[in-house]
Amino acid sequence: MTTDMTTDRGRYHHGNLRPTLLSVARALLEEGGPEALSLREIGRRAGVSAPAAYHYFSSLDALAAALAEQGFAELSERIDAALAGPRRHLLAGGIAYVAFARANPGLYRLMFGEGFQAYAKGNEAIGASRMRVYRQMKDDLERRLAPEAVANAALFLWSLTHGLALLMIDGQIEPGVDPDAKAEEVLKLAGLGLPAAK
Amino acid sequence: MTTDMTTDRGRYHHGNLRPTLLSVARALLEEGGPEALSLREIGRRAGVSAPAAYHYFSSLDALAAALAEQGFAELSERIDAALAGPRRHLLAGGIAYVAFARANPGLYRLMFGEGFQAYAKGNEAIGASRMRVYRQMKDDLERRLAPEAVANAALFLWSLTHGLALLMIDGQIEPGVDPDAKAEEVLKLAGLGLPAAK
DNA sequence: GATCCAATCTTTACACTGTAAAAATCATGG
DNA sequence: CCATGATTTTTACAGTGTAAAGATTGGATC
């Protein structure tokens, strides 16, 4: 009971393999990005043979999809938390969004990467969790804008935030500046947290 | 002389292999995305054995880098052309930017993908051509904004445009609308900020 | 023109990948 | 205690990138 199920091995039945695979895969993801995801390496690190994963995931892409789903869920939580905080602006949500991407660059890339994108087409759970993030933003906008302006404003904000997240992940920022502060400055240019346009 | 060097084969010496490899690779890229890039498949389509490519590229990543460099060059041209056109706004440049991504989704993904990103670190030519696109925008901003506002405005605009390009590539847009018009509407929101709060 | 050379391409080989199929091991309810 | 079902391993195959060595060729030099 007190044994660490994540690192246990030696027995034939691992006992806690699915979560272990996911956590190991996630570590791999942050070490080398989506390209570095390898069933064999995952198995190796989990102390298990490669095909063992096939009992829980029908393919490497399926495992990646599970990771991405985790990612969307966590991202959604972070945004919720930010919106519930002291600064309940959309701006706070955007900052949290970018911070999530910066904290989990490999995962974020996976979530919007193409290989996965193709696989996710058939996966309803992922389309749903992805849409949930989108809706968090849209709901807020609907309370503040005329109905006919919402769609474009939502796409505008998502583009800005998504793009900023990716550029920051790519290291496209002067070294030596606080990324959170920078993100806030840039997102503010959208005119969001401000009471009114100048 | 009048033979099509792109499809010639049969002879031991292909005669025009490097450009052929690049063009074949590019086709592959647009068929299946960066993940589908395969030296062996490239060789197959070029009518040549796989290691033949190693005379012109030190690795698959090097070939991908050459493609990305092409991409940045073309993107830069498109932006220049747009800025020289009747509507010499930055907006026109942004629309051209997004249109390029939409016309070459595989290439655009490669240009900003991670595998390539890692490889490009050492490649000076690519950092340069990438910076050139950035500078096109920055130059324009410097003519219109206070010096201390330029950096953040540039990052803001690039984030917005880059994000919009990627979301459109991902099909994140209602079907049945003209993508160019949509891009214009969304990019326009950057100028005035959001419409006034309700 | 014959000959040599350097550039170009092929063959072969190796280590790696995902994954299908069958066999082994174990946990558990009857 | 045993049979069954869940779990994991072994084995095998087709695919990949690429290193090394050999074959082929076009062009310069005599």
Image (cartoon, coloured by chain):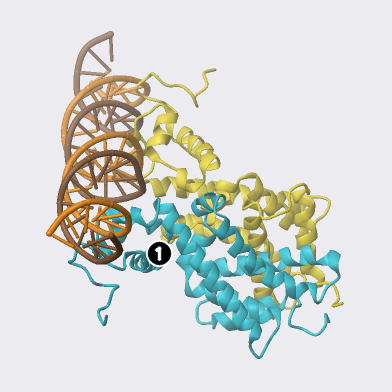
Chain colours: A cyan, B yellow, C brown, D orange
Q: Residue at x 79, y 72 (%)?
A: A142
Crowd class of label 1 (few under 14; some 14 to 19; many from 20; radius 10 Å)? many
Would you place residue A53 above or below residue A98 in this image? above
Q: Residue at x 52, y 61 (%)?
A: A111
SS of the residue under disc 1: helix
Q: Nearer the viewer, residue B154 or A17?
A: A17
User: Seen in the image, is A49 located left or right of residue A157?
Assistant: left
Q: Position of residue B86 (x, y in %)?
A: 83, 51
Q: Nearer the viewer, residue D14 or A103?
A: D14
Would you place residue A88 above or below residue C27 in this image? below
In which quadrant is the C terminus of chain B drawn? Answer: bottom right
User: Seen in the image, is B39 located left or right of residue B69?
Assistant: left
Letter of the chain that mark 1 sits on in the rendering: A
Q: Nearer the viewer, residue A11 or A114?
A: A11
Q: Quadrant of residue B118?
A: bottom left
Q: Residue flagged by tag 1: what amino acid is it?
A: Leu
Q: Residue at x 43, y 61 (%)?
A: B121
Would you place residue B30 above or below residue A57 in this image? above
Q: Nearer the viewer, residue B99 or C29?
A: C29
Q: Position of residue D4 (x, y in %)?
A: 28, 52
Residue B123 seen in render: no
Residue B68 seen in render: yes
Q: Position of residue D24 (x, y in %)?
A: 28, 20
How many numbered tags mark residues here? 1
Residue picked out by circle 1: A29
Q: Position of residue A35 (x, y in %)?
A: 41, 56
Q: Residue furthest bottom?
A: A86
